[in-house]
Amino acid sequence: MDLTGRKDISIVLSGEAGQGIQTLEQLLLRLFKGAGLYVYSYSEFMSRIRGGNNSTQLRLSPERVDCFIDRIDIFVPFGPGAMDRFHDRISASTVILGDNEHIDTRYRKGGHPIVNVSFAEMAKQAGSPLYANIVVMGLFAGLYGLGLDRVEAQMRRTFKKAGDEILAKNMHAAGLGHAFGSSVAASGTLVLPAGRASEPAGEMVTNGAETIVLGGLAGGCNFVSSYPMSPSTDVLVYFARYAEQFGVIVEQAEDEISAINMAIASWYAGGRAMVTTSGGGFALMTEAMSLAGAIESPLVVHLGQRPGPATGLPTRTEQGDLNFALYSGHGEFPRVIYAPGDFTQAFQLTQRAFFVADKHQVPALVLTDQYFIDSNCCVPPFTIEPGMDKNHIVETAADYKRFRLTDNGISPRGVPGYGKGIVCVDSDEHTEAGYITEDSEVRRAMVDKRLKKLEALEEEALPPALYGPRDYAHLLVCWGSTLHCVLEALRGLGRKDIAVLHFSQVYPIHRDAAGLIERAKKKIIIEGNATSQFGALLKLHAGTIFDHAVLKYDGMPFTPEQIIGAVERAL
């Protein structure tokens, strides 16, 4: 079985929760990145602590890889039933690497390429069946011709707090797997590409959650209050890891209502706060969103989308909360919504969210999803844009009015204790000084004042990014996390008359959007929900009517193969 003709190798690890697949994923990512390969991984989970079936896809390549695909080159089943959900993706050329007892009969009797190996038996030789995942790590190192010294370096990094005895047993397990993998490669039973790249050496392997956190830190975030909810919990966890180093207060609140009100209070006192949540948690935050709108408080919200309604599919992915983010909170007030397409954008846009929220005194939302948060890949070093952590706070005079009417709708923002003025805010309609009123003229003036900010937000809106030929005949429009999947599909289509337009800011929409879309003869919208929410938003604000919508809402991310098929049918 010779796979040297593959530009990249796609490996799927499948087993139960509790079998150490996530640990194996992290070990392999760093092992192969250190060996000069670009790496990518995505994990999908069932909603349970033990049992069920979870899987991780890894892609290894001398060229950059950054999205989930259908193709499986090597499938590794960790137990019985591990193949049940993958029959539509396992092809005649997929190599199955595992114990015959765990390989479905149709493949054993159908002449399928199989390498029979019992990870559990090797793990027992090392001291426990629990080491099966480490056996697999050693096996892949052997298949790729990597020395055990590289494996040991990763082991020491991962298990440095476990003690010498545990490290020794893990190394024994890895050594057994390495010997088997080396023998398979030497015999020609399974031959993998030998290509390497130099670029990954200067990059880091990270995930969507960590990049949101790093962007927040670059934006000056110093207070985080949240209640755990998948898939956004990892953002809270990473903030906790960085808290001491960067002086961030991280509070796990008793519920989402408390969390968002703490964040608003932090901004009121001069902090730079963020909440991270998901659909059901954000539902509890909507009244406080309206409070932020009423008192013109800056606020940054990270919303990790997952399929609803209600609990829905709590560990799966979807782009179903755009309308929710756009219309959350009763009453009319401005906001800005970003939806990063990759990790570099996530860093830049989260940093920008703090600046824009502070400058314009509005909520800024960053929309990701489970696919984005639970993906890992190589990224170049991030660039911090100077000034994005600037505080737009003034020293108050004795006659200070928190909601003073201005030409652009933005009042000077003071904080208690900084100056001689009183910083009075109220959720009721209020005067310029912040005191409750029911005066009709004041009411109209305050509504107009708040909505006036939309003009400046529209002026500063980020334009969509165009990929492909500038003289395109057909246009694929997407937003958020679908970016690299659509770009890989564009390359796979191999046509010079198709371009991609990606939106990383989905509200307010940049004024150039309509012209770029209307130039196309055929316009196709691609998004991960059932009702084409962004397509409807573009119709409302840009007058765009799409010829075709490619929609996905089964809890799994798009793949380039799916998009290629849908586009070919549409054209």
Image (spheres, rainbow, N blue to C red):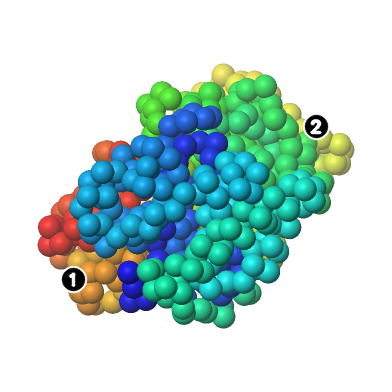
Please say if 487 is above or below 298. Answer: below
Which residue is at 41% across, 51% downward? 98
Please tell me whether mark 1 sits on a helix, a strand or a loop: loop
Is 186 placed left or right of 403 in the picture? left
* Number of the label disc, if any, that sits on residue 473: 1
Upstream in sequence: badge 1 or badge 2: 2
Which residue is at 60% across, 26% downward? 256
Q: Residues within 10 Å of mark 1 (few under 14, many from 20)?
A: some
Does residue 351 show up? no
Q: Quadrant of the C terminus?
A: bottom left
x and y percentages locating residue 241 in the rendered image? 73, 46
Q: Quadrant of the N terminus?
A: bottom left
Is 310 placed left or right of 207 in the picture? left
x and y percentages locating residue 190 in the rendered image? 39, 68
x and y percentages locating residue 40 in the rendered image? 48, 61
Disc 2 marks which amino acid?
Ile
Disc 1 marks which amino acid?
Ala
How far apart are labels 1 and 2 at the CA level?
59 Å
* Number of the label disc, if any, that sits on residue 422: 2
Does residue 396 show up? yes
Please tell me whether mark 2 sits on a helix, a strand or a loop: loop
Is 423 placed left or right of 542 in the picture? right
Nearer to me, 548 or 352: 548
Is 339 placed left or right of 427 in the picture? left
x and y percentages locating residue 483 in the rendered image? 39, 59
Q: Residues within 10 Å of mark 2 (few under 14, many from 20)?
A: many
Which residue is at 77% across, 39% downward? 249
Question: CB atoms at circles 1 and 2 under 8 Å apart?
Answer: no
* Number of the label disc, if any, that sits on residue 79: none
